[in-house]
Amino acid sequence: MRPSFYAIVILLLLIAGTGPVRAAQPAPTLRPQNMRLPGGSATFPGTDAGARATNAYCLMCHSADMVMNQPSLTAQTWLAEVNKMKNVFKAPIPPEQVPVIADYLARIKGPK
């Protein structure tokens, strides 16, 4: 048998295996939706330097509720978390504020 015969057989098998061609489905119609999101005005408790720094630098990405629902962590672990936010996720936390924030978080969300 000739090579062209094999090519024709393969082509016919490929065409037969594709099944019927369907018309394209129309795109769904999207309508604008209004959603009411919960307010995000909660801040970290206190007025000391730790609370002020945490409110200034952490609330730009996190809600206070989200942080307050984290597990209780040691001071060393909070320091590692704040350093991760600064160095890995590029949070604009001044270096001198890192230990202030970590100490504050350890006080309010550390082991009892």
Image: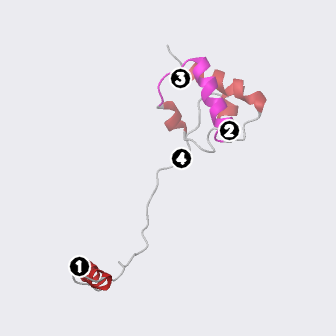
Q: CA distance from mark 2 to mark 4?
A: 15 Å
Q: Is residue 96 left or right of residue 5?
A: right
Of the residues tagged 1 and 2, which is closer to the observer? Answer: 1
Assess whether residue 92 is covered by the magenta stretch: no
**Is there a contact, CB below 8 Å, between mark 1 and mark 3?**
no
Q: Which residue is mark 2?
A: 57
Q: Which residue is mark 3?
A: 109
Q: Amino acid at mark 2?
A: Tyr
Residue 5 position in % (x across, y down) = 27, 84
Q: Amino acid at mark 1?
A: Leu
Q: Amino acid at mark 4?
A: Gly
Q: Which residues are magenta?
A: 70-89
Q: Which residue is mark 4?
A: 40
First in sequence: mark 4 vs mark 1: 1
The one nearer the camera, 4 or 16, is 4
Residue 57 position in % (x across, y down) = 68, 38
